[in-house]
Amino acid sequence: MSANDEKPKVEFEEHEHHEHKDDIPPELEALLHTEPLHGLTDAEHAERLEKFGFNEISEKKRNPFLHFLSFFTGSIAYLIEISFILTAIVQDWVNFGIIGALLLINAFIGWFEEAKAGAAIDALKNTLALKSRVWRNGKLVEVDSKTLVPGDVIVVRLGDIVPADARLLGIGVDGSATEVDLLIDQAGLTGESLPVSKNKDDTIYSSSIVKQGQMMAVVTKTAENTFVGRAANLIAITNEQGHFQKIINSIGNFLVVTTVVMVVIILIYLLVYKFKNRKDEEKTSKIVLDALRDVVVLTVAAIPVGLPTVLSVTMAVGSSQLAKKQVIVKRLTAVEEMASVSILCSDKTGTLTLNKLTFDEPYLKPGYTKEDLLFYSYLSAEPGAKDPIELAVRTASVAFVPILKELSDHTVPGYKITSFLPFNPSTKMTQATVLNQETGQSFRVSKGAPQVIVKLVGGDNEATEAVNDLARRGLRALGVAVTKPDSLDDWMLVGMISLLDPPRPDSAETIAKCHEMGVTVKMVTGDQLIIAKEVAHRLGMQRAILDASKLVDPDVSEEKLTDRCVHADGFAQVIPEHKYRVVELMQNRGIIVGMTGDGVNDAPALKKANVGIAVHDCTDAARAAADIVLLAPGLSTIIDG
């Protein structure tokens, strides 16, 4: 009796995928029970379109003239305007023209800087699907996605952009139950590094992409109520003064009070003095104008008219120096504010990590090496497949196996693939029959889900425990098996490939340097908690990572929530509202917060933070919402700059 037979069978542990659940109000739920193969009637659609509006992100347009006038407000601007009025009263037309030009230039610079912020919402609009296939009046038709309403039954399939938030029905376009889950890439929305498997009653989000399968779904939310719509709304309502601008305004306030008090005292003194020493023929109006003329000189002298210009030029020089290090500064005051940041919140996927599945330390059966494992996995890999797992396996195999390094195509010298079964979502594995041209013997190789491969080899408790250990650390496992010599049906386990989206090479060093400079780095990610903890460990961070529920506990005060944010090393399984909330809570405590990110889910927090930094290869929405854009991979340029 073998050792495996003597021990009780070890089962694979199921790790639940945690995802934010949207609450559906009862009145909306009542509208979602549409007959799948009939859809809404034209009358029902028209009624709901009237009620819910078009499925598009609307933008509240400001009156451009009133918006321009708003830049004539502020302490220093008021001082300049007082001088502007006084020069007109005393008919000093030279200074009147100079001060007027100064007012217009300062207002134009402010208007131009802020006008760029609206691009963030436009970028989010570009992620939405334009056309959708939907059941209407018992017919499957193609319509503009903006006409979708809650209760519409849509069909999503491989390659589609999901047009609205929707609940999967678990049936195909013909009404039969689907055997294969949908694979949804929602990395841009949630920050998850791998496509997520979804089936009946799961929610798919607007702007996510279907990577596998086909299924019908009922639309639950549209426009601003969708996942991406709420992110756009957060961007739209965030338009606060920067920390540096507040300091300048406080200086301006002090100068306003000082100048007004000084001018009033001097004006009273001048009037009293001039009236006391007036000549008989001297008119009262002339005395008042002379006094005002003297006061105008003092007022203009007290105004730091050169301050805005000096600040702009100084920060522009800093900005141009940063540009040489591939750092683009969109808001000049961000250069100064970056030096004041004490907490840097960072997205994980694509910012601290490569956003690319990579080969990690594998589990190997006795007698096999890492090269053996990768060689067999390469033989059973599908040539040219764009799947991230297949791509990771092929890349690692070519890097580590000497015989594969100089290949011009998928043909391996001395071996011939005589038959190949590509990945099937039902069998969850690929399989190849290979002829060893040197010995003339054939063998089969299989690669796939660990559960499937372990079952193929007749069970293996040790391998199952190894897979469970990898899963607890957030690593994705892939089993590889090969047939025994002289048999095409007797399988042996070679080992388990482990895959992870690894930290960038410079991330750990950058975080260490930040700590040396007194800046605390916190990871804020939409990925799973176990994955966040594993990445934090590899980056040398503490593993006090909390899940999103700790940010929305109704029984905890805002003060307590802020304490959690300050003391935690990061948050996982968060949505855009949570990232925004983390930044907001710490700002309310008076902390200067920086935020780095690359996805749609990061855009609201990037806009909210005192300094928003969009990293290399970021989405258009993140780039538009940020104050600083990094053109080089990684975060090291933040420290170098």
Image: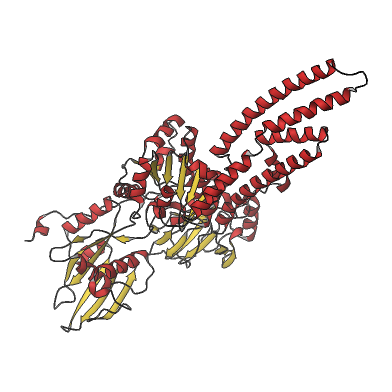
Q: Say left or right for 66 vs 451.
A: right
Question: What is the quadrant of the N terminus in the image?
Answer: bottom left
The quadrant holding residue 374 is bottom left
Q: Nearer the viewer, residue 558 or 174?
A: 558
- Above or below — where is 255 with respect to 279? below
Q: Residue at x 58, y 59 (%)?
A: 40
Locate residue 44, reporting x and y percent.
Answer: 62, 56
Q: Nearer the viewer, residue 23 or 523?
A: 523
Q: Residue at x 41, y 63 (%)?
A: 177
Locate residue 7, reporting x and y percent.
Answer: 11, 54
Q: Nearer the viewer, residue 500 or 440?
A: 500
Total number of numbered labels?
0
Q: Nearer the viewer, residue 283 or 430?
A: 283
Q: Say left or right for 70 vs 449.
A: right
Q: Residue furthest left?
A: 1
Residue 231 shows in the view: no
Q: Say left or right for 547 vs 159.
A: left
Residue 340 shows in the view: yes
